[in-house]
Image (cartoon, rainbow, N blue to C red):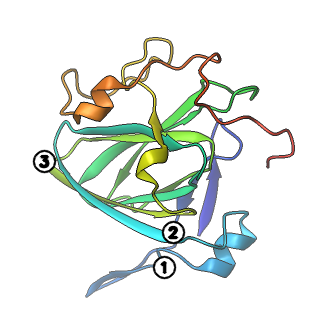
Amino acid sequence: MRIVPTELATVVIVEPQLHPDGRGFFFESYHAARYAEAGLPERFVQDNHSCSVRGTIRGLHYQLEHPQGKLVRVIRGAAYDVAVDVRRGSPTFGRWVGIELSAENKRQLYVPPGFAHGFCVVAELSEVEFKCTDHYAPADQHGVAWNDPLLGIPWPVPEPVLSEKDRRYAPLTPARADLPVYEAAER
């Protein structure tokens, strides 16, 4: 496994070690001790799996009272995956990282608590799995407008398929009361 840093210090790309042979391939998609040695959480409490059609954007989501770190991967198709620093007071507030995750490249993205997460499906059909460090709390779900002009995320579709909830999220501003607060001791 190889850890690839991104422009945001706590957001990292995980490239698993692939073992291909005549039958196909094998790789460890998660190994608690190895991931912990790399500085990633040792404890995930929930696994999620979504299936979406081309052009779907899910996000940008985060939880405030039950913040979730997410280890994201695509097992079928491909998605443009994005993490946005929404921690009020963070030196990287409002900055984001986007990478393509696919069944072919087998990369994972670790999105730490305090970051909004979203993805856009760029294949005909994509299945995305992610491990979470806290449980989903529907009453605690918050979000940022997918098309926030200040973020300027170059989503690969001009007219995405969105949920009603994702359509209603507001742009990111430091004045929002529903944002996590940056703590300088964070990794």
Query: Pointer 2 and pointer 1: residues touching (CB < 8 Å)?
Result: yes
Q: Earlier in the sequence, mark 3 or mark 1?
A: 1
Pointer 2 residue: 16
| Visible residue check, residue 76 | yes
**Mark 2 secondary-structure assignment:** loop
Please tell me whether residue 21 is drawn above or below residue 46 in the rendered image: below
Residue 35: x and y, percent? Answer: 65, 71
Residue at the farthest top position: 149
Foreground disc of the pair 3, 2: 3
From mark 3 to mark 2, how far is it between C-alphas? 25 Å
- The residue sitting at 16% across, 42% down in the picture is 54
Pointer 1 residue: 28
| Visible residue check, residue 82 | no
Query: Pointer 3 and pointer 2: residues touching (CB < 8 Å)?
Result: no
Mark 2 belongs to which amino acid? Pro
Rate crowding at label 1 as few (under 14), some (14 to 19) or many (20 or more) other CA atoms within 10 Å.
Answer: few
Mark 3 belongs to which amino acid? Glu
Q: Earlier in the sequence, mark 2 or mark 1?
A: 2
Pointer 3 residue: 124
Please tell me whether residue 141 is drawn above or below residue 85 in the rendered image: below
Mark 1 belongs to which amino acid? Glu
The N terminus is located in which quarter? bottom right
**Mark 3 secondary-structure assignment:** loop
Pick the residue in front: 171 or 26.
Answer: 171
**Residue 105: quadrant of the picture:** bottom left
- The residue sitting at 19% across, 46% down in the picture is 123
Label count reads 3
